[in-house]
Amino acid sequence: MNISKTSMDLWEYLSAERRPIALYGTGDGADKIIAVLENLGLSDLIAAVFASDGFVRNRSFHGFKVMSYSDCCHALENRDFIVLVCFGSSRPEVLEQVAKIASEHELYVPDVPVYGTNLFDRGFYESRIDDIEDVFSHLKDGISRSCFENYISYKLTGDISYLEKCESDPDDEFALLKDISGGCYIDLGAYYGDTLVRFLNRFPCLEKAVAVEPERHSFAKLKAYAEKLDDDFDIRCINALAGSKTGTELVSNSRGRGTRALPNSNISLTGTREIDVITVDSLKLDDVSFIKFDVEGSELEAVEGAKETILNSRPLMKIACYHRSEDVFAIVKKVLEIRDDYKVYMRHTRCIPGWDTDFYFI
């Protein structure tokens, strides 16, 4: 396994450089990056905050006036400063803007966990190197091994050139999943039905589906989509969380990320409601051919809750591995503890930071 720059992570690099930092973006991502800089005694390096033109408005963020990129360059008198991108996107126009800024200033997209408190820095990497190398040894093709090496290098350095080296076309996953045939598709984290549409269109052999989505606005769109499907297709939509055991839990009433607050998480909730928690096993299905897990940091718990289904049906699985720092090794270990006869693959589709990265169990 060839991991780059492990002798110095991004945070150590910023500390050694001591150049001013301009934060690109406001919101939750920027809050987390500022918190890391504060914790490391580097918050004095923050010199400016800027946003895309449509998001500037007349406002401040953490005591900084939010500027446009051009105003930021002018305010810093075109000094040699470092840009840290503080949001996620896969939109081509946004990525083009990031590339333009990167051509003019040194730019990084720090990897901070969507959920959990473990920062993927050099110390974390070195403490889990055995687990990381074990995952690498299980990857079954060169694309997966290259993806894994570059993904780990990105997480350490924030250098998006590593992400660019491991990008796959979104439809490449269909070659891995070509053996899906009939049976039931379970979509955990179905959002408004976007992945459901893709897979049902690609695999018309699927006979039924269960779509689970906790966020209420997305669930309403999911239900509307399901109602338009052919009456002959059996689809069940469930407004619930997926976990390791059934019960109830509090979730946020707000939209977007942070629907769920878990133990040892960096997410807190205001304005809550109670919602059911289901497990895959509680669905009592004996014909499951494919499961997609994208459950906002609860992937390990959801896999545990699917243990009997995995043992009995051996479904093909796609599992998101970018929400928590430990996901890049813990998910593979968890699945192979249940069944050791899966072939493991990894793919990343174009996105910053390293979101839209998944393991496939075939």
Image: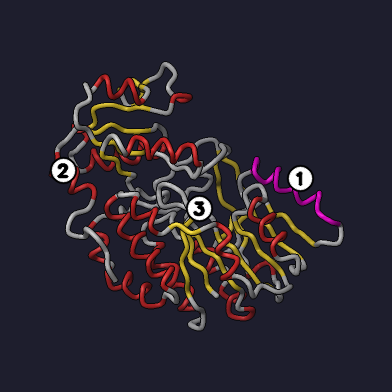
Specify the amino acid type for callout 2.
Ser
Q: Is residue 309 above or below residue 47?
A: below
Q: Residue furthest bottom?
A: 341
Q: Which residue is mark 3?
A: 296
Specify the amino acid type for callout 3.
Glu
- Tell me the quarter of the picture where residue 333 sits: bottom left
Residue 205 horizontal side relative to residue 230, left or right: left
Are circles 2 and 1 on residues that touch, CB within 8 Å? no
Which stretch did the figure color magenta? 216-230
- Colour mode? secondary structure
Q: The N terminus appears in which quarter of the rendering? A: bottom left
Badge 3 marks a residue whose secondary structure is loop
Q: Nearer the viewer, residue 321 or 84?
A: 84
Residue 244 visible to the viewer: no
Q: Residue furthest top?
A: 58
Identified at 62% across, 60% down, the residue is: 278
Main SS, magenta residues: helix
Query: Could you tell which of marks 3 and 1 lies nearer the N-terminus?
Result: 1
Q: Which residue is mark 2?
A: 15
Specify the amino acid type for callout 1.
Ala
